[in-house]
Image (tube, grey):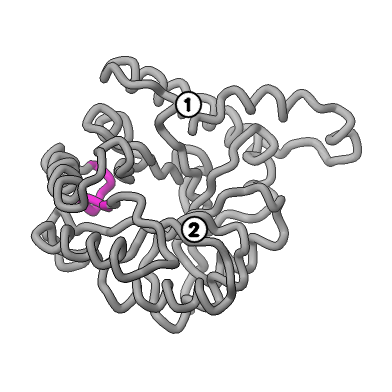
Amino acid sequence: MNNLENEDKHTNEPSRHAAEPAMSAAAIDGVAALRSVFQRVNQAAEKAGRASDRIRVIAVSKTKPVSLIRQVYDAGQRSFGENYVQEIIEKAPQLPEDIEWHFIGNLQSNKVKPLLTGVPNLVMVESVDDEKIANMLDRVVGNIGRKPLKVLVQVNTSGEESKFGVEPSGCVGLAKHVKEACSNLEFSGLMTIGMADYTSTPENFKMLAKCRSEVCEALGIPEEQCELSMGMSGDFELAIELGSTNVRIGSTIFGAREYPKKN
């Protein structure tokens, strides 16, 4: 999952970049930040006695331009995440097809078909939080004839009303529904957002790990086959220590998000 080995390979190809404009300062900072993130991932994994190649870094490019995403791609990054359907379906066609897109935002039923048809290289939806959205994804995947879609069940581990996600007590039931009733979906694990300020308390992460144990026991699958997507810019090292396999890094790689000003 770790892209460090690809990093130098893709930054040392002068023939591919000879005709391209020089990197902007922002892009250079993004590439340097990406390298720093991988170093920190390696250190956190080593501290936890885990293999760093079992941890996927997802570069969350919400609000960031295609040009900056491309610079980070050229530095070796392949897994990218977006929160909004309109944004990902606009960006994906402008970028290389070997990008592995993760949709990590709240997904409404009426946006399922545009998402799946507009992003053929979508590899995972990390935010399945009820049976209705699971059923809709399953139906559309089947109708358009694409290969089974990996999904994570989103769990609200912090108990905040502002957060989406099934309650921890309901994660086994939803995971079982995905696995047994949705033949076009591949249940791949669990996801949580944690506390609002990106500094999740360890209890959020420990709760998701507990949910994984319960889900794996109920479904009869080994825990190593059940991914945990938890940890963002402010807390991904702690998340790795507590078992995360997917860390979603946005501002640390791309800089602070820039939202359009409202009139």
**Residue 203: image x %, image y %?**
11, 41
**Residue 119: image x %, image y %?**
60, 65
Question: Mark 2 or mark 1, which has the lower sequence index?
Answer: 1
Relative height, residue 220 to residue 40 (above, below): below
Name the chief secondary structure element in magenta. Answer: loop
Viewer can see residue 138: yes
Three-letter amino acid code at the position of disc 2: Glu
Residue at the farthest left position: 169
- Camera-side residue of 260 and 191: 191
Three-letter amino acid code at the position of disc 1: Phe
Q: Give the range drawn in magenta.
A: 192-199
**Residue 5: image x %, image y %?**
60, 23
- Camera-side residue of 247 and 66: 247
**Which residue is denoted by mark 1 in the rendering?**
38
Residue at the farthest bottom position: 110
Q: Is residue 195 magenta?
A: yes
> Label 2: few (<14), some or many (≥20) within 10 Å?
many
Relative height, residue 136 to residue 172 (above, below): below
Element type where label 2 sits in the image: strand
Seen at 81% across and 27% down, the residue is 13
Q: With 109 as the anchor, is 3 left or right in this view?
A: right
Q: Quadrant of residue 106?
A: bottom left
> Label 1: few (<14), some or many (≥20) within 10 Å?
some
- Numbered label attached to residue 82: 2
- Numbered label attached to residue 224: none
Seen at 14% across and 54% down, the residue is 158
Q: With 10 as the anchor, is 193 left or right in this view?
A: left
Q: In which quarter of the image is residue 56?
A: top left
Q: Does the magenta stretch include residue 3?
A: no
Q: Quadrant of residue 95?
A: bottom right
